[in-house]
DNA sequence: CCGTCGAGGTTGCGTTTTGCAACACCCTCG
DNA sequence: CGAGGGTGTTGCAAAACGCAACCTCGACGG
């Protein structure tokens, strides 16, 4: 937090570049599943059911944005809403079978792509990047949580 | 490329989460300079002058998108276009003084933010994340380049 | 039991971000 | 000089997003 400040500007630039580029690239990789749809389905699949509010918190977006995107996914038949027994306000969101299918296809392409981009990396390096990003993301959740 | 494949799905998820979250967060951090404007000015400042086509290649966006965003920055007085002597087609883009000023302010906030999120990290870890991301981004440029 | 309030979502409206295709302009080269 | 390619711009349309108002349901105090 003192001397490594020289690394921070560089880190910020890499984060910006990645953030701006990754979305455009994902659209090209799996045109049948937009980046937004992919991110939501991926998250729902991982957690096996989440509420809209969880997604709002995860991505730091407005409720209305998530609401619309969920509605779109539902209308496309890629996601189902499940009522929660003890609470009629909330609903659990889960990918449908077709949603899982499209997700699997998009995943496959994404994995191949990232594989290609990390060709020549040692397994430790790939693991290290994953772990550091996971830590950064987790910290981001915490910081954003108090906003 | 063989055994580290178990890390790839996790890495993809972290990249997706980061990409989707980073933009929204940046908007909150510096409302006076949108994420798009910030990314462009930051890049122009770093290279001290670039052409629109460079930005297209860097972010993988459509020419028209960059063209509009550059026009917007110019109209806002944050960027100037410089003609290139031997070639009247191209133009060098540079941040204006006011552009550099706003960029510096946004930078300061971004650095503070990233600092906060890496609080408790060792300098080596911050450096490692920066270096690995830089490598990934560089590889991404190469892969995207053949598309 | 009933009114109030907060949690969880949805919708109307406007803005921003982006892609595609057609175009205009300039340079190069046969 | 004329064809072709590199460099941007613009018309049009769609996707992504925020804000504010609203609705519904659940919890809780009087």
Image (cartoon, coloured by chain):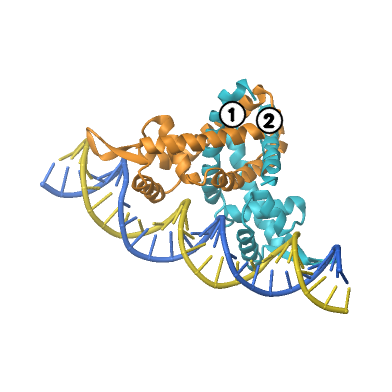
Chain colours: A cyan, B orange, C yellow, D blue
**Residue annotated with mark 1:** B130
- Is A95 drawn above or below residue A21 in the view shown? below
- The N terminus of chain A is located in which quarter? top right
Element marked by disc 1? helix
User: Can residue B147 be seen by looking at this rendering?
Assistant: no
Work out whether disc 1 and disc 2 sit on a shared chain.
yes
**C-alpha distance separating marks 1 and 2:** 15 Å
**Residue A81 at x, y percent in the picture:** 73, 65
Q: Which mark is residue B44?
A: none
Residue B103 seen from this side:
yes
Within 10 Å of disc 2 (Cα), the crowding (few <14, some 14-19, many 20+) is some
Q: What is the secondary structure assignment of the residue under circle 2?
A: loop
x and y percentages locating residue B30 in the rendered image: 52, 43
Mark 1 vs mark 2: in front: 2
Q: Which mark is residue B119?
A: 2
What is the chain letter for disc 2? B
Q: Is residue B131 above or below residue B44?
A: above
Looking at the image, residue A18 lies above or below residue B64: above
Closer to the chain start, of discs 1 and 2, is 2
**As displayed, is residue B22 above or below residue B85?**
below
Q: State the image quarter where residue A72 is shown.
A: bottom right
The picture places residue B34, in percent across and down from the top left corner, at 49, 46
Crowd tier of the residue under label 1, counting other residues whose Cα lies within 10 Å: few below 14, some 14–19, many 20 or above:
many
Q: Residue at position x 59%, y 25% from top? A: A5
- The chain identifier of the residue carrying mark 1 reads B
Q: Position of residue B73 (x, y in %)?
A: 38, 45
């Amino acid at each position: 937090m003192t001397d490594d400040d020289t690394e921070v500007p560089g880190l910020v630039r890499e984060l910006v570049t990645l953030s701006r580029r990754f979305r455009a690239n994902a659209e090209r990789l799996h045109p049948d599943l937009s980046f937004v749809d992919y991110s939501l389905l991926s998250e729902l699949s991982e957690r096996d059911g989440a509420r809209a509010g969880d997604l709002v918190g995860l991505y730091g977006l407005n409720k209305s944005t998530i609401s619309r995107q969920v509605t779109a996914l539902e209308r496309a038949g890629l996601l189902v809403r499940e009522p929660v027994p003890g609470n009629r306000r909330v609903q659990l969101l889960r990918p449908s079978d077709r949603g899982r299918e499209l997700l699997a296809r998009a995943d496959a392409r994404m994995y191949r792509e990232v594989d290609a981009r990390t060709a020549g990396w040692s397994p430790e390096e790939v693991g290290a990047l994953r772990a550091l990003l996971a830590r950064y993301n987790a910290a981001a959740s915490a910081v954003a949580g108090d906003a």
